[in-house]
Image: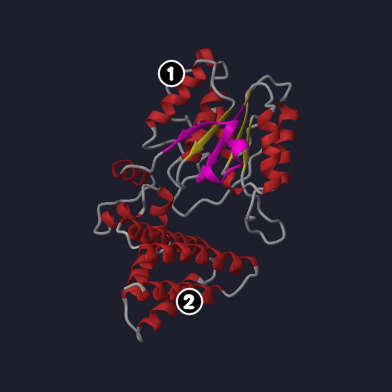
Amino acid sequence: MSTDRFDVLEGAISPAENTRLFGHAEAEHFLAQSYRSGKGHHAILIEGPAGIGKATLAFRFANHVLSHPDPAQAPEEIADPDPNSIVSRQIASGASHNLLHLTRPVDEKTGKVKSAITVDEVRRAGKFFSQTSGTGNWRIVIVDPADDLNRNAANAILKILEEPPKRSLFLVLTHAPGKLLPTIRSRCLPLQLKPLAPGALRDAMTHLGFDLSGPQTQKVLASADGSVSEALKLINYGGLDIMTAFEAILSGQEPGIRKDMHKLAEVLAGKDSETIFEFFVALVTGYVMDEARKAARTGEIDRADRFARLSSGVTERISVAQGYNLDRKQTVLMILDDLRAASRSMA
């Protein structure tokens, strides 16, 4: 059964094709030992922030299982996939009949990736299992990520998890496990991955061909929060410039700051700016929550409350703008005005 191709950031390697994983040796060892024991769980919930290697780990483990279908004969550790092996070639090309990758589908009308994994996608899993039930091979489904399942799709996945077919394995990825249905979480064995340490992040970026020895290295490593995808956004998508402009706007004074605000808003509203706009939204959300936490720790209850409410307001403003396809530039300007007003009023 073919897997869908999915968007990959510029400079990244598709998890299905990536032959290296950095910083998660302990998790790999656990999966290898669990599988070899013959008592592994049928559904594993791989948790952790975006961009730290959850999907790469899932595809590596799937490759390991499909390459060694008898658990008792499987190696004690997961090796780097051999790109020339039949299993690896099938997985990399999306042609494996024993692996199904469920992710947000592409809208045939717009050519863009949909905002959610729909129930129609999950129904593909039912068809997948029925078509492969007579082969005797392992059948593996990677849900990437489960956070994108809409309500109907989540309920459909739950039904399969409650009565899993024989020799089936679900690798369920999540950036925010607390947002998943509790019943889905209860059917899975949690495996938490931590953000990459600076050394592992540097190794991962070197593997992708990036030299992190320049003057911006420390800022990239510090700002990426242990995430390869965040590092790529900082380097390849202008993320460092966005951060610098954002910090200057928050600390700047009128009247010249309005020009900087409009310049930033125009960049974020430009054509093909989805990735950097999502980066900006995460930047804003992180800033607001950090301010709320800092205020709470120092006993500034009014300030903490104001920023906590501002966080909800920013999220709602973005949701409304996206839902009604409102002008993105104006949305960015309103968010920046809200942030500056909150900072001034509590200064």
Q: In this picture, which residue range is highlighted in magenta?
A: 169-193
Q: Which residue is under mark 2?
A: 333
Question: Whole-Å distance between the Cαs marked 1 and 2?
Answer: 55 Å
Vertical position of residue 264 compared to residue 30: above or below: below
Question: Does the segment drawn in magenta span residue 5?
Answer: no
Q: Residue furthest bottom?
A: 255
Q: Amino acid at mark 2?
A: Leu
Whether the magenta-drawn stretch holds residue 174 is answered as yes
Q: Position of residue 182 (x, y in %)?
A: 59, 39
Q: Residue at x 45, y 49 (%)?
A: 12
- Picture colour scheme: secondary structure
Dot 2: element: helix
Percent coordinates x, y for residue 209 in the rendering? 36, 48
Percent x, y of residue 165: 69, 25
Regarding residue 273, the answer to whether it shows in the image is no
Q: Is residue 267 left or right of residue 152?
A: left
Residue 76: which disc? 1
Q: Earlier in the sequence, mark 1 or mark 2?
A: 1
Q: Is residue 281 above or below residue 340?
A: above
Image quadrant holding the N terminus, namely top right
Residue count near mark 2 (Cα–Cα under 10 Å), binned few <14, some 14–19, many ≥20: some
Q: Amino acid at mark 1?
A: Glu
